[in-house]
Image (cartoon, grey):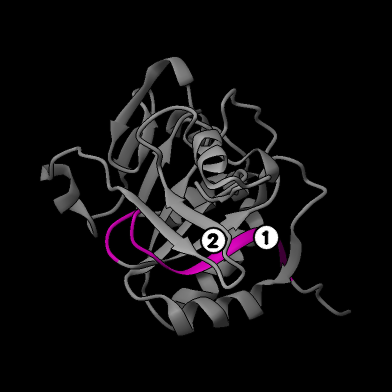
Amino acid sequence: MTTPTAELLVAETHRSCRVLGPGDRYGLWVQGCPLRCAGCVSPQWLPSTGGERVAVDALAREILEFAVDGLTVSGGEPFAQAAGLVALIHQIRDDRDLSVCCYTGYTLEGLRRGDPAQRELLGLVDLLIDGPYVSSRHAPLRWRASTNQRLHVLSDRHLDVLAEPDDPAGLQIEIGPGGDVQWLGVPHTPGFREALAGAAGLVEARDRR
C-alpha cells in the first residue's frame, strides 16, 4: 500500500523575512483559517478554497536551501494544518536544526488541549505568538499587533528575546518586478493595509502578516 504524500495548502512564501521572528527567516503562510478575527491583516488567506497544494518534501527542500536563521509560519491558521506542518518540520530537522516561530489565533492553553497533531506541532515550536487580533487593543509591539497576543518562548533556543525591549520590529517593504508593493511584518497602526493601497493607487495590496 502506498503512503499518500503529505501536502500543505500554502498561501505564500518568502525566502528572507527579517521582521517576523529573530534574524533572517524563511516565511511560510498557510491558506485557510477557521477563525474570523475582525480586522485581519490577511483576509485573502482566510478561505480554504485558495492557495496552492504543495508537497511537504518539495517545500522542505526549498526551506533548507534558503532559510538562514529559521522558519516562521503564519497564515491563515497554521494549527488548522498541524499534521502537515509536523511532517514538514521533522523533515527539515532531519537535515538542519532550524528554529521554528509560529503565529496562531488560538491561545497556548487551548492548543495544549487540542488534538494530537496540534499538540505535537506545539512541541516542535520554539517561539509562539498566540491569540486573535483584537483591533480595539492594537498596540506597537514586537512581532504582535494587539496587547492580548503573547510571545511564548517554548524552548531554550531564544531565551534572549525575553530580555530585549518589546519594540516593533518594523516592516519589510519591497517592490516586485511588476511594480507591485509587497510588505511583511506587523503594522504599527490599524488600517495600514488600506492606507498603503490607497496611497500607492493600487486596487489590491499584496500583504503578509
What element does badge 2 sit on?
Answer: strand
Q: Nearer the viewer, residue 54 or 173?
A: 173
Image spot of residue 93 (x, y percent):
44, 75
The residue carrying mark 1 is 10
The structure residue drawn at horizontal position 55% and vertical position 80%, both measured from the top left corner, is 62
Distance (Cα) linking label 2 and label 1? 8 Å
Q: Which mark is residue 28?
A: 2
Q: Magenta segment, principal secondary structure? A: strand
Q: Position of residue 85 (x, y in %)?
A: 59, 60
Question: For residue 54, which quarter of the picture?
Answer: bottom right
The quadrant of the picture occupied by the N terminus is: bottom right
Q: Amino acid at mark 2?
A: Leu
Q: Nearer the viewer, residue 132 or 179?
A: 179
Per the image, is 18 magenta?
yes
Highlighted magenta segment, given as a residue range: 6-23
Q: Earlier in the sequence, mark 2 or mark 1?
A: 1
Residue 123, percent across and down?
44, 52
**Count of marks, rendered view:** 2
Label 2 Cα crowd, 10 Å radius (few <14 / some 14-19 / many 20+) = many
Q: Are marks 2 and 1 in contact (CB under 8 Å)?
A: yes
Q: 10 Å neighbourhood of mark 1: few (<14), some, or many (≥20)?
A: many
* Residue at the (57%, 65%) spot, across then down: 179
* Residue at the image position 47 percent from the left and 35 percent from the top: 192
Please identify the residue farthest to the right as the structure is shown.
Answer: 1
Q: Regarding mark 1 in the picture, which secondary structure is present there?
A: strand
**Amino acid at circle 1:** Val
Residue 105 is left or right of residue 202, and the answer is: left
Per the image, is 62 magenta?
no
* Residue depicted at 30% across the width and 48% down the height: 170
